[in-house]
Amino acid sequence: MGTTTLTFPTGQPMRTHLCSSSYALLFNTAPLLTAPLSRLAMARSHSSKDSQPKVDKMQQLVHSDPSGGWEKCWEKGLTPWDLGQPTPILVDLHQRGALPKGRALVPGCGSGHDVVAIACPERFVVGLDVSENAIKQATKLFSSSKSAEYFAFLEADFFTWRPTHLFDLIFDYTFFCAIEPEMRAQWASRIRDLLKPDGVLITLIFPISDHEGGPPYKVSVSDYEEVLHPLGIRAESIVENNLAIPPRRGREKLGRWKRSICKSFL
């Protein structure tokens, strides 16, 4: 059993124990901190109970069918990691002009909110997902978007996909933590091979905790450094994500990584 810290509107932290098989609080996307404090404990308990069965079922599907588990999750609507909206910090970076222009990639794009959020005339964004149903949902949601000419959704495996062009930007959120930890070195190799020389990797490092098992598997800054540094990808900055959704605050950092100028391999 692990211990995490939740921060409430009073500014006082509350310690709570996280069972090794319990991830409801990590995935929960309900706006709990907007509720009055007198109702907060009830809302948190209710929301956690609602989320936990979905997380348990999601884990069972992924572990029982490593090749098709994620597809089954989308078929059954077991996607507790999906915010149902763009990631706030990504929108903020886009609006402040803090993201590279050119070509961008969002691996594990799911329903596509982040892809569409940063697509613009100066940036073409590719959303990649191994799930056919995820890509169908993203296409259904955004095919009529005003910015549709600036993004594309592709059903493909990140680890075997071979694009014809490299990327100026890659954004990773709830993808690194979803893969088996022993695959992280392979993830880093694909990041290296897909980034242009001097390209930028933006990561939301989540969930920073001490729980066991997954997905999501626990992560730390050092987990990223261990696999990225040997490939010449180093952090320009790693800061707290102050725009994290309330249930994930304190367990999420924003990392900006720069690829050293050397040869990329398609």
Image: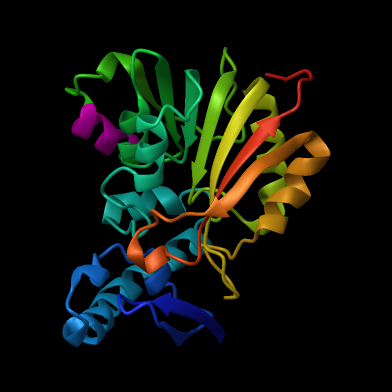
- Please tell me in which quadrant of the rendered image residue 163 appears: top right
What range of the chain is rendered magenta? 135-142
Q: Nearer the viewer, residue 129 or 169?
A: 169
Picture residue at 36% right of the left edge, 22% below the top? 152
- Please tell me in which quadrant of the rendered image residue 245 appears: bottom left
Residue 137 locus on image (x, y percent): 25, 38
Residue 71 locus on image (x, y percent): 39, 47
Residue 30 visible within the image: yes
Please identify the quadrant where the N terminus is shown.
bottom right
Q: Nearer the viewer, residue 41 or 173?
A: 41
| Color encoding of the figure | rainbow
Picture residue at 44% right of the left edge, 72% below the top? 23
162 with respect to 249 (left or right): right
Residue 38 locus on image (x, y percent): 18, 87
Residue 38 sits above or below residue 200 on the image: below
Q: Nearer the viewer, residue 177 or 133?
A: 177
Queried whether the magenta region covers residue 139, the answer comes back as: yes
Please identify the quadrant where the C terminus is shown.
top right
- Please tell me in which quadrant of the rendered image residue 76 appears: bottom left
Residue 83 locus on image (x, y percent): 31, 52
- Most extreme residue toward the right, as rendered? 230
Queried whether the magenta region covers residue 79, the answer comes back as: no
Picture residue at 77% right of the left edge, 18% below the top? 263
Picture residue at 26% right of the left edge, 19% below the top? 148
Residue 215 sits above or below residue 154 on the image: below
Magenta span: helix, strand or loop, mainly? helix
Q: Nearer the viewer, residue 49 or 60?
A: 49
Residue 130 sits above or below residue 164 on the image: below
Residue 56 visible within the image: no
56 with respect to 133 (left or right): right
Q: How many marks?
A: 0
